[in-house]
Image: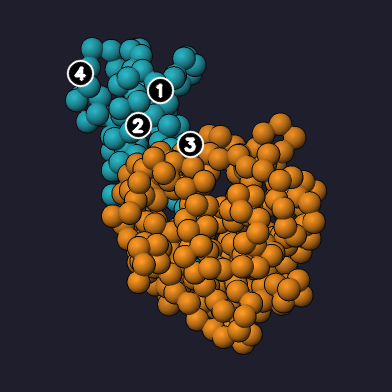
Chain colours: A cyan, B orange
Amino acid sequence: MQQNNTNQGLSQSEIYDLYAPAVYGKILGIVHKGPIADKILEKVFIDAFKNKTAHNNHLKTPLMSMLNQAREKSYKTIRALSIFTECCAGCSVCIKGKK
Amino acid sequence: MSTVLKRNNVFIKGEGEKVILFAHGFGCDQNAWKYITGAFVPGHNLVLFDYVGAGNSDLSAYDAEKYNSLDGYANDILDICTELKLKDVIFIGHSVSCMIGALAAIKQPGIFKKLVFICPSPCYINQGDYTGGFDQETIDSLLEVMEEDYISWARSLAPAIMSKENDAGLGEELSDSFCSIDPVIAKQFAKVTFLGDNRKDLPLVPVESLTIQCSDDMIAPVAVGQYINEHTPKNTLIILEAFGHCPHMSHPAETIAAIRSYM
């Protein structure tokens, strides 16, 4: 994770403690399921700590960047699960249209 | 029961000389055909089976190398046909099974009389002018999610996905359906399915075929059906009013009518 004025000098565990509640709330608001949210949260922070979370925009704080990542990963997960569900013998769309 | 028939949990029913072979799609098993098989029992011998990894197939027969391409699954279909001495088979495949059936027919055209493709796709990823329905990133996300406990996740989300327009009973039916595949095998099957590109095989299909496409299908859009129709010799395209990716389950009457009109 890039350091800037908002988290400079903080350890990874301190950054986690600082941002995780807000990021988790964002994720849970999209996926609605704790086990799924847990995994996405883990991925968001792994990416952040590996410097994969880009926040070069000076107007973005690390939290904003992680919230963006959280939103993106959450929707991708939902989309992926929808595809899987659709393929699996009776997706939402096909069952609802049963004649 | 022979090894082949046990491996693929082959089930035969019906009466008659004409043979219809039903091949289920990704994430399903032979139970997926339960809404339409009854219509074809009179006058036909129906052969149903589970791919290795699905339903009540023999999981010990799974070979990651063999099933690293659709060819492995096509060879299993040919094994079944050989074992049962089937000829002039009408093959009805759903989703990825359509291309598996096409490959089997290319390998041994003498076995098949007609192919019926329900919601087929030769390639799921958009490439150049070709519309497959998905971008690479979406498929990568799907495969990434399948590294997790995706079946439980999908099961837990199914009622939420369906809740607005379906009743709880249908949600339970959907949840139960997730139990029919082995999660590890399904991951590799998904990779083979969604990363594959069988467009080059379409012109080689040696027998006449029917493409049945739904009017609104997030997995295989209408454009895919049109592509198959344009690139496959002796192919007929029927676009159903039905929507979704499993019309044989959701709209069995319309699906049966389309198949009958062709047969």
Circles 1 and 2: CB atoms closer than 8 Å: yes
At a point 28% along the width and 12% down the height, the residue shown is: A8
Q: Are marks 4 and 1 on the same chain?
A: yes
At a point 62% along the width and 61% down the height, the residue shown is: B111
**Front position among marks 4 and 1:** 1
Tell me where residue B144 sits by quadrant. top left
At a point 77% along the width and 46% down the height, the residue shown is: B231
2 or 4: tag closer to the N-terminus: 4
- Residue B43 visible in the shown view: yes
Residue A86 location, x and y as percent?
A: 52, 58
What crowding class fits label 4: few (fewer than 14 Cα within 10 Å), some (14-19), or many (20 or more)?
few
Q: Which mark is residue A44?
A: 2
Give the CA distance from mark 4 to mark 1. 17 Å
What crowding class fits label 1: few (fewer than 14 Cα within 10 Å), some (14-19), or many (20 or more)?
some
Q: Which mark is residue A53?
A: 1
Residue B258 location, x and y as percent?
A: 72, 72
Give the CA distance from mark 3 to mark 1. 18 Å
